[in-house]
Amino acid sequence: MILALLWPKMSRAGAFAGIIVGGVTVVVWKQLSGGIFDLYEIVPGFLFALIAIVAVSKWKPQNA
């Protein structure tokens, strides 16, 4: 949502990638425990989704 409002180069494919990567990260992270996996799962979910949005939006930009 933040990138959709603040980054005009975000593409539809990037948004879908962020939704999928963020959701999968939260589900998988919740199942793991110990060390870094004790971190609240929304934090890595947000970070990985952000990376996925930027990467996919740069790789597959909007078609004018």
Image (cartoon, rainbow, N blue to C red):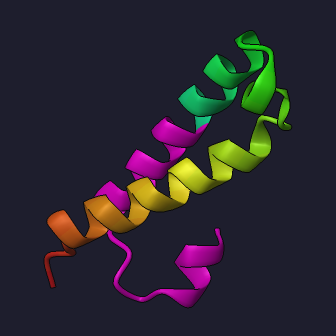
Residue 15 position by quadrant: bottom left
* Residue 43 left/right relative to 50: right
The residue lying at 32 percent from left, 69 percent from top is 11
The quarter of the picture where the C terminus appears is: bottom left
In reply to whether residue 6 is colored magenta, the answer given is yes
Where residue 22 sits in the image (x, y, percent)? 58, 41
Position of 50 relative to 11 (above/below): above
Where residue 20 sits in the image (x, y, percent)? 48, 37
The quarter of the picture where the N terminus appears is: bottom right
In reply to whether residue 11 is colored magenta, the answer given is yes
Count of picture labels: 0
* Residue 20 left/right relative to 42: left
Residue extent of the magenta highlight: 1-22
Position of 33 relative to 16 (above/below): above
Position of 22 relative to 25 (above/below): below
Type of secondary structure dominating the magenta stretch: helix
Residue 51 position by quadrant: bottom left
The residue lying at 36 percent from left, 59 percent from top is 14
